Amino acid sequence: MMRLTCPFCGARELHEFQFHKTAPEPGANPFAAVYERVNRTDISQEYWQHLHGCRAWLYVSRNPSTGEVYQVHLLGTQS
Amino acid sequence: MSVRAPRYSAWSLLRGRFSGPGFWRPLWSGRQLQKAYDVVVVGAGGHGLATAYHLARDHGVRRVAVLEKRLVGYGNVGRNTTIVRSNYLLPQNHYFYEDALRRWETLSRDLNYNVMYSPRGVLDLALSDGEMVSLARRGNAMRLAGIDAELMDRAGVMKFAKELVPAGTRRFDIVGGLLQQRGGTVRHDAVAWGYARAASALGVDIIEDCEVTGLVTTAGVATGVETSQGPVAAGQVVFAVAGHTGAIGTMLGVPLPVETHLLQAMVTEPIKPLINSVLIYVHPHGEVYILQSDRGGVVMGGFLDGFPSYTREGRWSRLEDVVQSAVALLPQIAGLRVLRHWAGTNDMTMDGSFIIDRIRYDNVFLNGGWCYGGFKSIPASGAACAQFVATGTAPDLIRAHTLSRFASGHLLDERGGGPFPVRL
Ligand SMILES: Cc1cc2nc3c(=O)[nH]c(=O)nc-3n(C[C@H](O)[C@H](O)[C@H](O)COP(=O)(O)OP(=O)(O)OC[C@H]3O[C@@H](n4cnc5c(N)ncnc54)[C@H](O)[C@@H]3O)c2cc1C
Ligand SMILES: [Zn+2]
């Protein structure tokens, strides 16, 4: 995994982006949303920010065991 | 049934030299997986092997198995940068790491295996007055606990670490440092092999190529584990899987305050002795630590890659970052070639401190959340975890390291960074 494709800026080097955390399960209580993480080895759904780019918040789904990136969306527009 | 391993000594080395093939035996015996054990330990990293060793040695637990998905030493125990130290700020952490450091001092004798503990000194550098203040705070906390710590000004640092000369070539000059002289390095492979050998000699079964895929329970009590080699009954189960701690939580249906991040390290071609201690510099955007291996290679590492990954493939920009930081401190090494670089999976907790506690079931234990600092803790963790499992009561040294501390607000946030392993 060397690059992410920002919906606004296109494919950009990984160091422009900052990982924030894995997206909490729907309906997670406030404690879980802050402290617990979803630890799946096959798919990881995450909040990222294109921090050193357009600064958009992104929703990224990836395979953390292979590095393959499935989807990058503007946060809130993921299906 | 214990298999007597020959004791190592200068005499046995000599005998080995003049004996035929077959004198040197495998370090641990290739025993077969049995149907049932008193304690099954999952993961043959440092923590799993040390826990099994202490269960057998200190508590007389007869039937102990360590089940390992890959090979002994394949995980982080064989991938780390070998630094040991006890220079932590919080009492709950520094007393524990100090216990570990004292055990490192005598471990070669205890295991009858040379783990090459080298108290060459760990020197944290400050390049600004603010950094100096925070080092002084940490050093004072350590000294109050009776742990050696020496605050040095610029002249002191330059005298101790002569390789940091020539000055004036750095953009930010060195202001001072905090030295822990008893800190240093320990040969990581030897730790895995030494514990495996000693545990095996006490009758512990070390089973490689055996992945634990599930927990078997009856009426709210764990009765064994499912493995790639079939089911195994167990009186108690200890998970010591380091980078796969989060995945074990998912397997047990317990979401954990853990994220798995890669950490990289690298080593250069060997050179003559240059760096006599371990140099560490933590800056607002990352960190770098540098030491020279006994073979002469310059070993360097830095901060996490920064996102969940199990690939063990490091991220390029982090490698660049570490090299740039290292060269800024030691311009002399700029021309060296990097021979190898690698990565390991680290179980980062939301406060940066480890967890040894029961998980979901009364007879299932979690030994994890070691973050990027779990090598130095191995001897203390093995002893404490074994005591917890054997007696049912957590020893004082790990009483604060519960899983429930996150919900109750008793965090052990060494860094003061909040519930994120990475903030850059
Ligand atoms: C590059 C790097 C540098 C580091 N530098 C330092 C340092 O200088 N000082 C320091 O103190 N710490 C350091 N660390 C951290 C330290 O290495 C780890 O915290 C520590 O080794 C983790 O504990 P362990 O040895 O038990 O883990 P591991 O050796 O990773 O053991 C866990 C084992 O569990 C096995 N396993 C996982 N899942 C299963 C399953 N389902 N069934 C069976 N087996 C399973 C794995 O295969 C693995 O062998 C570093 C880490 C890295 C990656
Ligand atoms: Zn963008």
Image: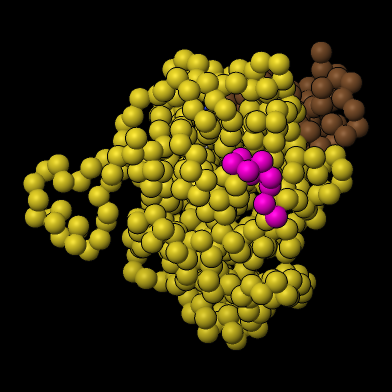
Chain colours: A brown, B yellow
Does residue B333 appear in the picture of this structure?
Answer: no
Locate residue B210 relative to residue B23 in the image: left or right. Answer: right
- Quadrant hosting residue B168: bottom right
Residue B213 lies, in percent from the top left, at 55, 19
B374 to B324, vertically: above or below = above
B186 to A48, vertically: above or below = below
Residue B291 lies, in percent from the top left, at 47, 63
- Quadrant hosting residue B261: top right
Residue B360 lies, in percent from the top left, at 73, 28
Q: Looking at the image, which residue is at 68% across and 22% down?
A: B221
Locate residue B279 relative to residue B260 in the image: left or right. Answer: left
- Quadrant hosting residue B357: top right
Residue B215 lies, in percent from the top left, at 61, 20
Is residue B400 part of the magenta span, yes or no? no
Does residue B62 appear in the picture of this structure?
Answer: yes
Q: Looking at the image, which residue is at 80% across and 40% down?
A: B404
Q: Which residues are magenta?
A: B388-396
Locate residue B365 relative to residue B375 in the image: left or right. Answer: right
Task: Report the number of numbered marks.
Answer: 0
Q: Looking at the image, which residue is at 75% across and 51% down?
A: B400
Q: Looking at the image, which residue is at 46% across and 33% down?
A: B63
- Which of the pair B362/B279 is nearer the observer? B362
Is residue B394 part of the magenta span, yes or no? yes
Q: Quadrant of the N terminus of chain B?
A: top left
Locate residue A71 relative to residue A42 in the image: left or right. Answer: right
B295 to B125, vertically: above or below = above
In the current view of this chain or complex, which residue is farthest to the top? A79
